[in-house]
Amino acid sequence: MRLLVLGGTRFLGRAVAAEAVTRGHEVVCAARGLAGNVPPGARLVKVDRDAPDGLAPLAGERFDAVVDVAPISYDWVSRALEALADRVGHWSFVSSVSAYADFGVPPTGVGDPLLPPRAEHGSRDTLGDDPDRYGSIKVASENAVLRAAGADRSFVVRAGLITGPGDESDRFGHWPARLARGGRVVVPDTDLRTQYVDVRDLAAWIVDAGEKGTTGVYDGIGPAGGLLDLLADVAEAVGGDVEFVRVPEGRLAELRVAPWGGPRSLPLWLPATHRYMTARDAGPALAAGLTPRALVDAVAGALDRERELGLDRERKAGLSRAEEEEVLAALGGSAGE
């Protein structure tokens, strides 16, 4: 198979390229080449997707399959389709569960209501002022893929929380790193369900789809389970000697602990407005070939990534040692080492 990865230098795009190379496919990565290197065995074609003619270096090339991991920009997606859709056999687009309109109600499947589409160019610096913008751009991009490539050639993956080698969010990885340290650990007292997918498993499934011609729209995520059960399993996997300090959600808010991500947060914990964001039905994806690895392997990959980045670095998500000490002190205790 001749595979084009629109991206291929970081996280999921690089994992897809690496997986395809391992299987013996000819892999071309189209990217600026600024975020990192393509995997050994793949070929980099330098493009600028911000420019109207930025994909000109690919003119005349044909591919059996394309994987587009464009994170935010509708323009990137629409230009790629205009330039390449008639010269490609199969088109995979990585969307997001953020495309859904309401996370406060239990999900029923990929037919759940979506956010209104917004055919816009976003950036990582402009999303904070409008939390729905990212998902709305993904909806517009999905629509463009389905129009241009058709349902008989399109594979749309609404990915959930992705973890593993190359992860840049600090969300899942916070927990293996924290629990490996041991001691008294602040956790939300909740029956919230949560889920994740290892980047290597998601990449393998996307390459499978290109090989087999899998089509359709799927939630690309692993099975959901209780958050506290997951944290207990992670602690066991890393061998952490921990005591969970379960704190009511209202009390966490009083102590200025935020959910999900950002400074002074508890990752994987969600507010009531997003309670079901991590409770999607993984059944259709599993039936279509997504194969999650054992938790111990996923945790090992996440912990390796944490150590690579530095366990005591300034994080994008999670409580620092000092912040957790402060919370525990307010609760009448102190963090263990």
Image (cartoon, rainbow, N blue to C red):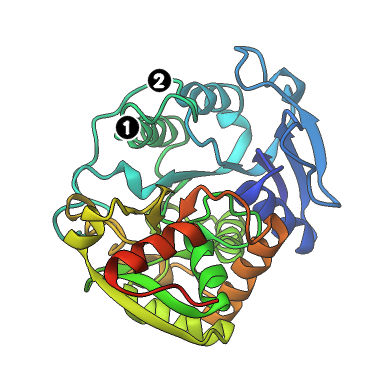
x, y percent for residue 94? 49, 45
Image position, residue 71 (x, y; %):
51, 36
Residue 235 left/right relative to 113? right
In the image, 174 versus 181, the foreground residue is 181
Instruction: Name the residue located 23 percent from the left edge and 52 percent from the top edge.
Output: 274
Badge 1: how crowded within 10 Å, few (<14), some, or many (20+)?
Answer: many
Image point (36%, 80%), residue name = 244
Numbered badge on residue 102: none
Question: Any mark on residue 136, and which?
Answer: 1
Q: Residue at x 57, y 69 (%)?
A: 177
Question: Can you identify the residue that label 2 sits on?
Answer: 120
Q: Nearer the viewer, residue 252 or 289?
A: 252
Return the x and y of residue 139 as percentages of the image width and height: 34, 35
Location of residue 56 with respect to 31 vertically, above or below: above
Decide: is 292 above or below 113: below
Q: Amino acid at mark 2?
A: Glu
Observer-nearest of 208 and 325:
325
Instruction: Report, in whole angstroms, how far the alpha carbon at label 1 lies from the one at label 2.
Output: 9 Å
Residue closest to the far top: 52
- Image quarter of the C terminus: bottom right
Q: Say if mark 1 contacts mark 2, CB within 8 Å.
A: yes
Amino acid on which disc 1 is placed: Ser
Could you say which quadrant of the image residue 312 lies in? bottom right
